[in-house]
Amino acid sequence: MAIKESFSRKLFVGINSSFLVFLAMLTLFPFVNVIAGSFATSLEMLQRPFMLFPRNPTILSYRYILSTPTFVRSIMTTAYVAFVGTLINITMTYLMAYPLSYKRLTGRKIYMNLIVFTMLFSGGMIPGYLNIKQLGLIDSLWALMLPGAISTSSLIILKNFIQQIPDELKEAARIDGASELFILARIIVPLSLPVLATLSLFYAVGHWNSFFNCLLLINDPKKWTIQVLLRQIIMQAAGIGDSESMRGEGARVILPTEGVRNACIIVATMPILLVYPFLQKYFAKGALLGSIKG
């Protein structure tokens, strides 16, 4: 028999739901405004700073971005760095978190103190640059993936998660003659898919949004990531929009500078937005499970 809800309960649920919907709309409006602005003309952007739908839609901004000869190459470069870099991050994080999850590990507290120390203090930009230069990684995509291969916070989350896996599973595998790498690959990794998806998302977003490292370490424009290329496009658009114009199909068309900026934001964020729904169900669960026990 279904339990009948009281009027006060229904009132609370209604008010709470309305408030949450209102908050969701507040967070959604700016993004919708950026999308609308990417399809708007320069005149409409000046007349209507905030809009949800452009009156005279145009794809000029996207045509300008996609017409750059290095755009597709930069997208592929960024996807390569994000994919390979995430694989390196996850592999190195697992290989370090697994032994640290054993409380009987000799010097475990010393290692953990040194790891936590890196969260508070770092060598700085100049020593890091000199170190990468000495390794011969300047102007190489490896410079965007190998430094910082292990995130301290992700390492601690993964270590705490592995500690929650019953030791009986590992002991049973050892009795059957399994090695530590076999236990890691066939027992630990399959049981930690939620936290794996969460950390992969963290690492992938970090690689995709990385801007300063590429600007500092990559000199060859052919190896620019999408973030650096979009910065260059925005700078060029700002100069063109003020004094010059684009010529398209025999007519002079003023490039919408603000529209280019909005289009760049959409292009830079859309891949992550498309991937996130597939990992969202693991996201909250993995972050919570890895942060309960120390």
Image (cartoon, rainbow, N blue to C red):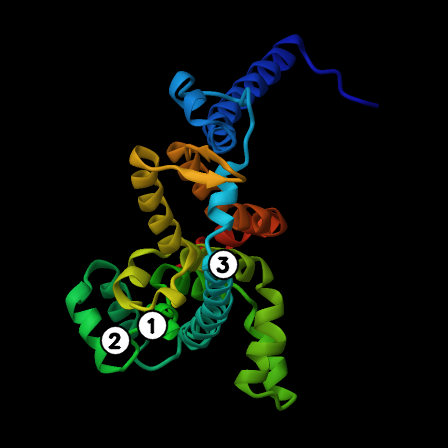
Instruction: Name, please, the residue furthest toward the bottom.
Output: 177
Looking at the image, which residue is at 50% across and 50% down? 67
Viewer-nearest of labels 2 and 3? 3
Which three-letter amino acid code belongs to the residue tagged 3? Ile
Q: In the image, which disc is placed on residue 177?
A: none
Residue 154 x %, y %? 41, 61
Label 3: few (<14), some or many (≥20) within 10 Å?
some
In the rendered structure, are the residues bearing label 2 and label 1 in contact, judged by CB atoms less than 8 Å apart?
Answer: yes
Of 55 and 128, nearer the camera is: 55
Q: Amino acid at mark 2?
A: Ile
15 left or right of 71 in image: right
Measured along the vertical axis of the image, is residue 161 above or below residue 265?
Answer: below
Residue at 51% from the left image edge and 56% from the top image edge: 198
Residue at the spot of label 1: 143
Residue 202 rendering spot, x and y as whole percentages: 45, 56
Q: Quadrant of the N terminus?
A: top right
Which is more foreground, mark 1 or mark 3? 3
Q: If you read the primary sequence from the N terminus, does the residue marked by circle 2 or circle 1 appear first?
A: 2
Q: Secondary structure at mark 2?
A: helix
Q: Residues within 10 Å of mark 2 (few under 14, many from 20)?
A: some
Q: Is residue 124 visible?
A: no
Front residue of this view, candidates 161 and 217: 217
| Alpha carbon separation for disc pair 2 and 3 | 24 Å
Which is more N-terminal, label 3 or label 2? 3
Does dot 1 land on a helix, a strand or a loop?
helix
State the quadrant of the C terminus: bottom left
Residue that badge 3 annotates: 75
Residue 270: x and y in percent read 53, 46
* Res 132 label: 2
In the foreground, 158 or 91: 91
CA gap between label 1 and label 3 equals: 18 Å
Are there few (<14), some (14-19), or many (20+) residues within 10 Å of tag 1?
many
